[in-house]
Image: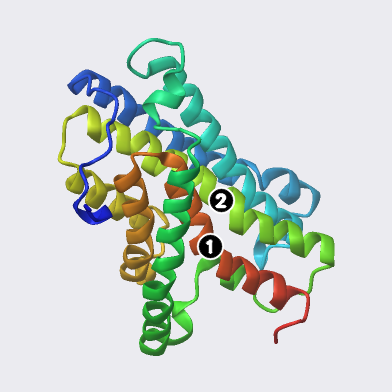
Amino acid sequence: MTSPAMADPPARPPARGVRAGVLMLCVFVVAELVMVLVSVLVLVPFALADPALLDGALPTWPLLALLTVPTTVAALVALGGTALLGAGPKSGRVRRELAIRWKWRDLGTGLAFGAGGLLLTIPAAALWSAWVGDDANSAVGDAFADRELGPTVAVLAFVVVWLIAPLGEEVLFRGVLWRALEHWRWNRWVVFAVTTVVFSLAHLELLRTPLLLVLSVPIGLARMYTGNLLASVVAHQMNNLLPALAVLLSTTGVLP
């Protein structure tokens, strides 16, 4: 029996060439720029209501808006851009271009990669924290540090970190960007490596970039071995489960 690691790569839609790859890359870049712009605009109403808002730590609702809205809007832009500029027939274009297929086997593979990846990422995170110290904390962890939230708000923050953020990020990086490189007929390992590096750098947490590279490896492998974006979404959500639980338990006082 052939092992998963040695199996033939999954079938993928035919590459359409340089132009198709450039168009998808443009979709990715525009979506990323929209994310940056929305990250600024989403705080404007809060800042107008309270000009002192930006002088210290963000209050809870502006923080949740900052975590949720930019990524969601960017993902919607990416989906719309794919529908408009993606290659092939318009019917089913988004699902085909972004490799969105509801297959329980692939979802199970994504879950397995995510769970197995924890065996790698938990020790890596512990070693990194011991080496770097307090600066090893993620931006999200720092944002929620020493906050006390009501149960409803804490659960909302948990859902954002666990489910919503990974879904949006996967559409961008292992959906649109991945497909752009496939159109250029790059080797699948090169596509995996490039998207992993870009994903890690895009978090703009330079000190944590080496750790982010390690964390993103199982996610990219899930995408590569299944050829299904939903597998990497599940793997990413599995990876984010522990940080999301940490936010939930710390902000409700269950953990110190």
Circle 2 crowding by C-alpha within 10 Å: few under 14, some 14–19, many from 20: many
Amino acid type of disc 2? Ala
Question: Looking at the picture, how far across and down is residue 244, in whole percent?
Answer: 61, 66
Where residue 191 sits, quadrant-wise, is: top left
Q: CA distance from mark 2 to mark 1?
A: 9 Å
Q: In which image quadrant can residue 63 be found?
A: bottom right
Q: Position of residue 221 (x, y in %)?
A: 31, 53
- Name, please, the residue furthest toward the front: 1
**Which residue shows up at 70% across the image and 84% down it?**
255
Question: In terms of secondary structure, where does tag 2 sit?
Answer: helix
Q: Is residue 21 above or below residue 72?
A: above
The residue that disc 2 covers is: 165
Q: Is residue 9 left or right of residue 101?
A: left
Left or right: residue 34 compared with residue 181:
right
* Camera-side residue of 249 and 229: 229
| Mark before the other along the chain sequence, 2 or 1 | 2
Q: Secondary structure at mark 1?
A: helix
Q: Is residue 13 above or below residue 256?
A: above
Observer-nearest of 128 and 101 = 101
Q: Contact, CB < 8 Å: mark 2 with mark 1?
A: yes
| Mark 1 lies on residue | 240
